[in-house]
C-alpha cells in the first residue's frame, strides 16, 4: 500500500478531485436549502480530502492519504446500506467500493477491507431484524447483495493475482544509474561495479547477443575489414 504504481497514483488523485468537487457542490447546495448538518459533513469531508490529496501530491506521505480515503469509502458504504442513498441506489455503490479496495490496496488489504464491509453488512442486517436499527433494503435485496458480493470478491481476487504475477515479470530500471566515465561499468546498489550487459540482465528481462560494430572490426581486425571493403 505504501508504493502505488504511477497509474494508480494518477487514478487516486483524479478520484479524490472528483469527490472534492461533488461533495463541495452538495455541501453548498445543502447550505442553501438550510440542511446544515449534511452540509457541514460534506464540506468537512471535502476539506479532509483536499488535505490528503495535498499530502499525496507533495509525497509527504502516501500511507495516510490512501488509508484515510479507504476508511472514507468504508464509512460511506455503511451509510449507503442503512439509508439506501438516492432513491435506493446506494446498494449499487456497494458493488463499486470493493473494486476500489482491491485496485488501490492490492490482494491483502483489499480482501481485508472487503471482509470488513461484508461482515458489517451482515451485522447491520441482523441488528435491523432485532429492532435495533432500521435499514432501507428488504431481505431479498440484502441476500442478493451478499451472494453477488462473494462472486465479485473472487473475481477481483483472481484478477489482482494475475495482474501481480504479470507485473512481477516486468522489471523496469528507473532513476539515476552510476556509470564509470571510462570503462562504462555500472555500480549496483551494493557498491559492486558490473559490466553494462550484466547489470541490464539482472534488472530487466533483456538478454544480449554479441557481435562487432564496423569501427571495432576496423580497429581489431584491420585485415578482415580491408578485405570486406575491397
Image: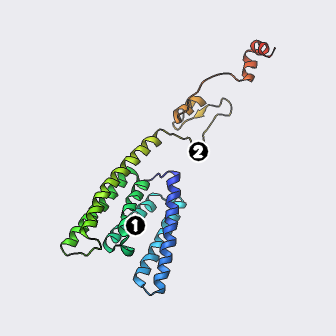
Q: Is residue 96 above or below residue 158?
A: below
| Residue drawn at the location 48% of the way across and 52% of the way down | 4
Residue 85 location in percent, x, y? Answer: 37, 73
Q: Is residue 102 left or right of residue 217?
A: left
State the colouring used for the structure image: rainbow
Q: Looking at the image, is 141 positioned above or below residue 171?
A: below
Q: Which mark is residue 210?
A: none
- Which image quarter is the C terminus in? top right
> Which comes before the other along the chain, label 1 or label 2?
1
| Marks 1 and 2, how far apart at CA | 34 Å
Tell me residue 131's x, y (percent).
19, 75
Q: Which one is in front in this view, the residue at disc 1 or the one at disc 2?
A: 1
Residue 202 position within the rendered picture, expressed as x and y whole percent measured from the top left: 52, 33
Number of numbered discs: 2
Q: Residue at x 44, y 87 (%)?
A: 34
Q: Residue at x 45, y 82 (%)?
A: 30
- Determine which residue is flagged by label 1: 72
Q: Are marks 1 and 2 in contact (CB under 8 Å)?
A: no
Q: Secondary structure at mark 2?
A: loop
Residue 64, image x and y in percent?
44, 61
Residue extending furthest front?
A: 140
Is 159 situated above or below 13?
above
Q: Nearer the viewer, residue 1 or 95?
A: 95
Is residue 32 visible in the rendered structure shown here? Answer: yes
Residue at left 30%, top 62%? 145
Q: Secondary structure at mark 1?
A: helix
Location of mark 2 (residue) = 175
Amino acid at each position: 500500500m505504501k508504493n502505488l504504481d504511477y497509474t494508480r497514483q494518477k487514478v487516486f488523485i483524479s478520484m479524490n478531485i472528483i469527490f472534492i468537487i461533488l461533495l463541495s457542490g452538495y455541501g453548498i447546495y445543502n447550505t442553501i436549502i438550510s440542511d446544515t448538518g449534511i452540509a457541514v459533513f460534506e464540506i468537512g469531508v471535502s476539506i479532509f480530502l483536499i488535505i490528503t490529496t495535498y499530502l499525496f501530491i507533495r509525497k509527504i506521505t502516501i500511507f495516510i492519504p490512501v488509508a484515510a480515503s479507504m476508511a472514507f469509502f468504508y464509512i460511506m458504504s455503511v451509510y449507503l446500506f442503512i439509508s439506501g442513498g438516492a432513491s435506493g441506489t446506494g446498494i449499487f455503490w456497494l458493488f463499486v467500493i470493493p473494486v476500489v479496495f482491491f485496485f488501490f490496496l492490492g490482494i491483502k488489504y483489499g480482501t481485508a477491507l472487503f471482509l470488513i464491509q461484508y461482515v458489517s453488512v451482515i451485522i447491520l442486517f441482523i441488528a435491523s431484524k432485532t429492532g435495533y436499527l432500521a435499514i432501507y433494503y428488504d431481505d431479498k435485496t440484502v441476500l442478493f447483495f451478499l451472494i453477488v458480493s462473494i462472486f465479485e470478491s473472487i473475481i477481483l481476487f483472481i484478477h489482482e493475482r494475475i495482474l501481480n504475477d504479470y507485473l512481477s515479470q516486468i522489471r523496469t530500471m528507473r532513476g539515476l544509474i552510476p556509470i564509470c566515465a571510462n570503462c562504462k561499468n555500472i555500480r549496483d546498489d551494493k557498491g559492486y561495479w558490473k559490466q553494462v550487459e550484466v547489470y541490464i540482465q539482472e534488472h530487466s528481462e533483456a538478454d544480449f547477443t554479441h557481435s562487432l560494430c564496423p569501427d571495432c572490426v576496423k580497429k581489431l581486425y584491420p585485415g578482415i575489414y580491408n578485405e570486406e571493403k575491397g
